[in-house]
Amino acid sequence: MSGFDDNPFADPFAEPSIQQATRSSTQNGLEEYDPFSSTPTNTTVGGTGNTTNYVQPTVGAPTQPAMVTPTPANPPSYTPSAQQQVSSAEFQRRQEELEKKAEELARKEEELKNAGTQGARQDNWPPLPSKFPVGPCFYQDINVDIPLEFQKIVRMLYYLWMFHALMLLLNILGGLSVFIAFNEGAVFGLSILYFFIFTPFSYICWFRPVYKAFRSDSSINFMVFFFVFSFQLIVSIISAIGIPSMGSCGWVTVGKAFNESKIGLGVFLALIACCSTFLALVMAYALLWVHRIYRSTGASFAKAQVEFSQGVMKNEHVQNVAANAATAAVRTQMTQSTTGATSPRF
């Protein structure tokens, strides 16, 4: 019966060995656990015939939230255009042009102020010396009188007139050469006459009208220019042809010189003929250019007629003549009325 001394209804946890094991495991677990330790601790969970190593989790510092650092994207490749590639020389040239225009505007304002304070502007063309017995006859300043968009064509026409005068002078030299070589004085004599007539008359009859036309937008001056300049163009074409009886050294005269085996004279006359041909071509181009501008400005023949009538009515001499005629007519009428009233009746 000794083997059955234990009470089967007794508390199994009341045995001293089980209570000691349970107490030691609980105390060791609580005593060895350190929540602030950075190294894990091994806790042995004891039991009857069984030991288990329990690794405590490491409690570290709180971690930062994950953030994505943006990487700067490279800018797209930029290729400057041809218009943006302005060199320093181009920039300097534009700067000089702006300064020149500013100086011209300042000078124009000064000229206008002086004209307003001093009255009529003093004539400055032709630029003759002060000791010359004849003074200037016209006032000419393209930078002051002509609008900026028309200065190029007016300046070109002025240079064309100067080249025309030079060609008349070369025609005199060609006529002298023909007179010496062929003993023909007609070309030489007419060339001198042409120089002294056409040089001043070309300036007065076609350059001054076109100058005043662009200065004041005058349709009647445009009409005068077209009429006279067309005649001048025809004369230049005839001069380039070189009919000997008309006093010009052209291609006909050149052929005659080469036929007579006068090579030097032929080369000189050919140079004059080339210049005359070039002059005729430039005149034709200038005539078309001015006509294009004339059509774009809204000018017309009707406007020219209105300007002519207004100019005639505003002319002081015409007004004086009309006033004198009206006064004479009134006096005649009054005289006739007085005579009729005092005459005896029969």
Image (spheres, rainbow, N blue to C red):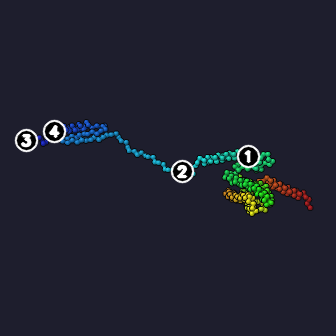
| Residue 252 in sight | no
Which mark is on residue 15?
4
Disc 2 marks a residue whose amino acid type is: Pro
Sequence-wise first label, 3 or 1: 3
How far apart marks 3 and 4 lie (CA) works out to 21 Å
Nearest-to-viewer mark from 1 and 2:
2
**Rendered view: 12 above or below 212:** above
Question: What element does badge 1 sit on?
Answer: helix
Mark 1 is surrounded, within 10 Å at the Cα level, by few (under 14), some (14 to 19) or many (20 or more) other residues, namely few
Question: What element does badge 2 sit on?
Answer: loop
How far apart marks 4 and 2 lie (CA) works out to 97 Å
Q: Which one is nearer the viewer's eye here, 142 or 127?
A: 127
**Circle 3 sits on which residue?**
1
Residue drawn at 62 percent across, 48 percent down: 93
Which mark is on residue 80?
2
Q: Are marks 4 and 2 in contact (CB under 8 Å)?
A: no
